[in-house]
Every structure is written in C-alpha cells, then in structure tokens.
Amino acid sequence: MLEDKKIILGVCGSIAAYKSATLVRLLVKAGAQVQVIMTPDATNFITPLTLSTLSKRPVYSDYFKPETGEWNNHVELGLWADAMIMAPASANTMAKMATGLVDNLLTAVYLSAKCPVYFAPAMDLDMWKHESTQHNITALQSFENILIPPGTGELASGLHGEGRMAEPEEIIAFLTNDIKEKLPLFNQKVLVTAGPTYEAIDPVRFIGNHSSGKMGFALADELASLGADVTLIAGPTAQASKYKSIKRIDVTSAADMLQQCLTYFPTVNACVMCAAVADYTPATVAAQKIKKHDDGLSIELKKTTDILKTLGGQKHAGQILVGFALETQNEEQYAIEKLQKKNLDLIVLNSLNDAGAGFKNDTNKVTLIDRELQKTTFGLKNKAEVARDICIKLTELLKK
Ligand code: CTP
C-alpha cells in the first residue's frame, strides 16, 4: 500500500522524535518516498543528519537553505505529498494546526497540503488529558485529519498513562489499513488470467502463441493498486508483477489453466480472462520425442475447454466476468456474440487491424462493450493506461 507513495513526515519537538528514525526506515522499506520536515525544536531531539541518511533525502526545517539562499517551497511540498504524517505530533504543533497558526515550515506545509493528514500525538499524561489538547484533537478530526491514537505505558516523565506516541510498526499498520480501506476495490477478490498456454506435442515441443502476458500483468497490477485482492493465473511468460500482494499461480497448458480457474472462480467477485488460451491441443502427447521422417507430419488436434464459457455457466449473482476478443473482421459483431454466448458482463475488443494493438506490443487500442451493449472506444494507449480504463469500468460494474 505504501509502495511509491510520496509521504511527508512531520517531526515535532518531543522525546518521541527518537522513534522517527525507525518510522522513516519502515516507510522507506515499504517502498515510500519520504520527505522529512522537522520543527526547529525537533532538531534538539534527533539530528536532521540521522533522518536524511535514513530517508535518502535532505531534511527541511527552515524556509530557506542558508547555504544557497534557496527557498523550501511549502506549497510545492504540500502538493507533492500523497499523505502527510505528523509523528510525533506535539501538543504545541497540534494547537497550531487546529488554529491555522503558521510559524515554521512544517505548519506552512500542513496548511498547503491537500492530501490526507495523519497525526500521532506524543505528550505527557496530563497534557494529553487537558481539555485544550482534546479540543484541538476534535478540531483536527473535524478537518478530516486522522488521529493515530497514542498508547498507554511509561512516559518520559516517569508517569504511567496515556500519551505515548504509537510505535512505528503500529503507525505503519494503521496507515496501510487506512489507505487500503479507502481504495475503490478494497475487499474485492479478482481473478486475472494472463499470457499464452503451451500445448505439449511431445516432451520437447509444444503449440503456443505470441501472447506476451503484458496486458494481463498490467491489469493485475492496476487491480492491486486499487486495493483488490488479486490472484493471477499466468501461462508461460517473462513478465513480473509490480506488487508482492498479487498471488501468482503459474500454469502451462489450457487444461492446467482451466483447473486453476475452476478452483479460484467460485470465491471471487470478478474474473478478467485475459489469457490467450489455446483453442486446440494435440489429441495425444507422444511419450518420447517424435523423430523426423522424410515425409510430412500430421498432428491431430482436439478442442480445449472454453474456460470463459465454462465460468460464464457457473457465474453466480453479483459476480462480474470479463472476456477479451481479438478480431480481424466484423469486430464488434463477433465481440457482442462472444459476450452473449459466454454470459459475460464486459468484453474488451482489440482489433488486429489497429496498428499498435494486440500481442507483444506495449500499447493497445480497445473498445469496451458491456451487457447493455454500451460501447466505449479508446485511443492507442500503453497497456498500463488501458488496464486503468478497464479497471474503471470494472469498478463501476462491481458497484452496480
Ligand atoms: N478463452 C478461454 N478458453 C479458451 C479459449 C478462449 O477462456 N479455450 C477466452 C480468452 O481468454 C478470451 C476469450 O475467451 O477472454 C476470447 O477468446 P477467442 O479465442 O478470441 O474466442 P473464441 O470464443 O475462442 O472464438 P474464435 O477463436 O473463433 O474467435
């Protein structure tokens, strides 16, 4: 969830600032880009050098870089961030945030930020309990700032009670869950198939096709980034998924793919059948390598099971099934026939007549046709963008 996210970590003057080092490390480890901004007082508790080394970026605490006279643009910093975390958020900085008081770079960036703001308070027991602090927290929550509640335990003062900043691991878990829950496909399980299938002729030869798997992998990545729980059934391909959360199952033949699809399909909310499944497979697989002879060679083929049609026949209410059609003539008519014959909710049509569309390319040009025969045609785009268009439509269909 935090991969590639741009995060501003605001560090305030509190003894809990020593935990910021671990927090930066965990954020970076999770793949986030972390920009640390410290209040001047925070630099008394932990050095900017520690946090810049861990975040691999310069740490800001002044409006100006004294050595060059350059401006640390608070508006640009605020707009850059996907999320802002105030940790530790001191009583003093929370009071400034609640009243719009800007007397340092961090509070200026806070007022400029348009992204979600999380705050993890850290203070002594009585400061935490004070009506003024609680009033400020209510005000911040009314601005839709998100409270990461403090823990209870021994405090720096020696007192025991509520006010300890949440542990860095707890902050990461909180953030991850919060981001995930807000994603459009949170709690949706989606099955994606990708790549070609290889149909064995003998132990060394097979019948295959030119599918690269790029479109299916781009779809799986996009679905995962939207919060879906993705299972990817992949034929032989050199592609790799961007997200570790994607469960990948490698298969070789159409029969293997069928078996895995039948296993996973009943429990998913949607299935996108992007694989280029072989329509025919050798009727028998030779146990030994076929030796060459002077005359030609005929291989008898039998039809494979149409996986998509089989799933269409098993589909239960609310499940969304998406198929692909690759056509060279009468494109829309054939695509609509497939949509209806296979009981699909959406068909993605790509025509081999369009330059840059189809197998192997990094680009594709598709038309989406749904059950109501609503048609949307897109221009030539890279496969990640095409995946985004398909996922927007799929999200709509899942919400119906
Ligand atoms: N498909 C499938 N199982 C097969 C063959 C195809 O699930 N054995 C799926 C593909 O993943 C794709 C869709 O069916 O989503 C369209 O495949 P295509 O081969 O174009 O359609 P067919 O119905 O096989 O018709 P034709 O080959 O005659 O165009």
Image (tube, rainbow, N blue to C red):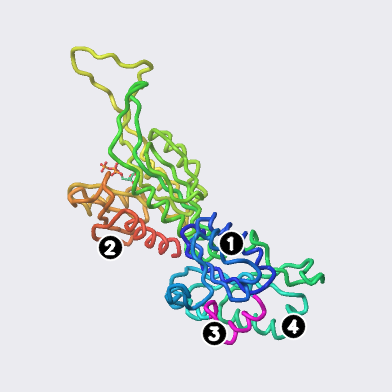
Please give the residue where the numbered disc 2 appears in the rendered image. 376
Q: Which mark is residue 130?
A: 4
Disc nearer the start of the sequence (3/2)? 3
Farthest top residue?
294
Q: Are marks 3 and 1 in contact (CB under 8 Å)?
A: no
Q: Pinpoint residue 13: horizontal percent, then vertical percent.
A: 65, 74
Q: Which residues are magenta?
A: 90-107
Tell me how far mark 3 sits from mark 2, CA to CA.
48 Å
Please give the residue where the numbered disc 1 appears in the rendered image. 50
Is residue 114 visible in the rendered structure shown here? no
Task: Report the mark closest to the observer, 1 or 4.
Answer: 1
Taken as a whole, is the magenta stretch helix, strand or loop? helix
Crowding around mark 2 (Cα neighbors within 10 Å: few <14, some 14 to 19, many 20+) is few
Disc nearer the start of the sequence (3/1)? 1
What type is the residue that disc 2 sits on? Answer: Thr
Please give the residue where the numbered disc 3 appears in the rendered image. 102
Task: Report the mark closest to the observer, 3 or 4.
Answer: 3
Crowding around mark 1 (Cα neighbors within 10 Å: few <14, some 14 to 19, many 20+) is some
Q: In the picture provided, is 27 more to the left or to the right than 344?
A: right
Q: Pinpoint residue 122: horizontal percent, then vertical percent.
A: 69, 72
Is residue 178 visible in the rendered structure shown here? yes
Q: Are marks 3 and 2 in contact (CB under 8 Å)?
A: no
Disc nearer the start of the sequence (3/4)? 3
User: From the viewer's perspective, is residue 2 above or below residue 296?
Assistant: below
User: From the viewer's perspective, is residue 310 above or below residue 66?
Assistant: above
What type is the residue that disc 1 sits on? Answer: Thr
What type is the residue that disc 4 sits on? Answer: His
Say which element carries label 2: strand
Tell me how far mark 1 sits from mark 2, CA to CA.
52 Å
> Which quadrant contains ligand 1?
top left
